[in-house]
Image: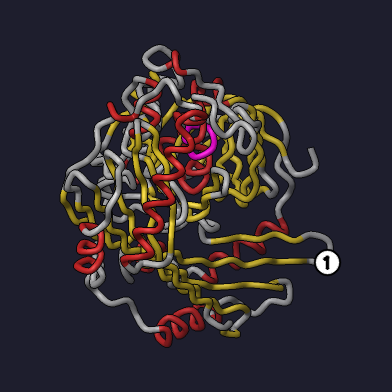
Amino acid sequence: MFDFHPQLKQRFAALRTGAEFFSLRYVRESGQYLSVRKNVAEPPSLSRDEGAMLTVRVNGVEAYAATNDLSQSGLQAALERAEQQARRLKPHALLDLLDLRGQAVSSDRADYFSPNFDQPFPSLSDCYQLLGAESAAVPKDERLVNWQVSIGITHVEQIYLNSVGAELRQAQRFVYPGLDVTAYDGSDSQTRTLGRENFGQQGGFDVISRCGLVGAGPLVADQALQLLLAPNTPQGPRDLLLMPDQMMLQIHESIGHPLELDRILGDERNYAGTSFVKAEDFGRLQYGSKLLNVTFDPDIPEQLASYGHDDDGTAASKQFLIKEGLLLRPLGGALSQFRAGMDGVANSRACGWNRPPIDRMANLNIEPGDQPLEQLIGNIEHGIMMSTNRSWSIDDARNKFQFGCEWAQLIENGELKGVVKNPNYRAISAQFWKSLSAVGDANTVKVLGTPNCGKGEPNQVIRVGHASPACVFSNVDVFGGDA
């Protein structure tokens, strides 16, 4: 761990530039993906990547260049390319009126580690044995036509150095358990999963225990078969109880992306759209009901996007973005904060060594309320419970949306009733969160996350975390697959 740090530090100290500020961000990432499909072990997928990004500021203009040549000459050449680019950009800079010489930079020194990082992960053989056992536990039924059990493991080591003395090191391990079962009866197919791709955490083998992978095969298979026999979801307004593995998608699409400050300032217009939120809305807009409390929280050790500093070296700390429904703070890193003249959070992040940091969601969570799950259900007269996202559609301003789930049960007079299939709901973000009528307690919270949030040109696919309790929304438009 950090075995390259002494050489990297020595080479950084030997770099020469005319820039008033420069930095280096080194990233080494390795991954493995293991799966067993229908009791047959598939070959492991292995990956490794390593390189560095050099960033400079010249006359208030920032530019960067990346390289996988980590020799002294390779780093120096990348630094010179970045400096040349900054000088060429000066007459044409889009932010010509914004001189970055006034932007503060980090001089922190710190290390950050995933929980249990020092404990070895089980061997490939042991992992395949676990996956094989879980695959074999799926019941024999001719209607079960496909199933897969998997584990993805990613190790990331990152070192940030800059010309004012910052020295930040992070070593993280990300674990992604997966299980899906597909049932088919000749006319319909239904797939049930263990949280889709959305169970990811930092840690070691403890993640496998927390996600409930062991022993899940028979349950997930049974639910897939239940969906085959279930009636279609009825259409009409109902109170909607969303479980955490669907809440994470709801948070992600209709709070996370709309609050990214670079998007609000006009970036991303030709790729992932804009936002219905305006800069002047902060401190004024009632985003949701009084029950809505949303935080940027990098301090939950096992959550997927917990870290000590972001990729620009800014120290990360928990902040309320929305408190009692009032919009307070955007998801904006140091550069966007400087551009907008408002406070943000430490969420300037890159997906790897050859991408520059931009405003990204990290851990974006809903704080728990005080109602146990039984009370949430018991207070609903005419409703539906949905879990596990399977489809999503949202407009380019992140406002109008339509989401579909894998699993649903009707709720009548405070009791869970029969299973229904193809559940969907639609609403408008600016109105939907105001219909939040009940928030589950800490016992309903799940810490989830996804490795594949895409943004930016060229595209960056990055890890984000979402923790949420179960939540109830009043009078939501619900419909089935044929509506």
| Residue 371 on the magenta span | no
Magenta span of residues:
252-256
| 437 or 83, nearer to the observer | 83
Image location (x, y in percent) of residue 321: 36, 28
Three-letter amino acid code of the residue under disc 1: Gly
Where residue 58 appears, as percent x and y from the top left, is 35, 37
Seen in the picture, residue 139 relative to 164 is either above or below; the reply is below
At label 1, counting other C-alpha atoms closer than 10 Å, the crowd grade (few under 14, some 14-19, many 20 or more) is few
Q: Tell me which residue sits at (30%, 41%) in the image.
A: 19
In the picture, the quarter occupied by the N terminus is: bottom left
Locate residue 392, reporting x and y percent.
Answer: 64, 42
Residue at 39% x, 58% y: name it: 77
Q: How many marks?
A: 1
Percent position of residue 252, x then y: 49, 40
Q: In this view, does 427 lie to the left or right of 373?
A: right
**Depth order, front residue of 40/79:** 79
Confirm whether residue 114 shows in the render.
no
Q: In this view, does 295 lie to the left or right of 240?
A: left
Q: Which quarter of the rendered picture does the C terminus lie within?
A: top right
Q: Name the residue tied to disc 1.
A: 186
Res. 239 visible in picture: yes
Does 328 appear above or below 446?
above
Examine the image and state in which quarter residue 374 appears: top left
Question: Looking at the image, is 49 positioned above or below residue 415?
Answer: below
Q: Which of 51 and 63 is in front in this view?
A: 63
Dominant secondary structure (helix, strand or loop) of the stretch shown in magenta: helix
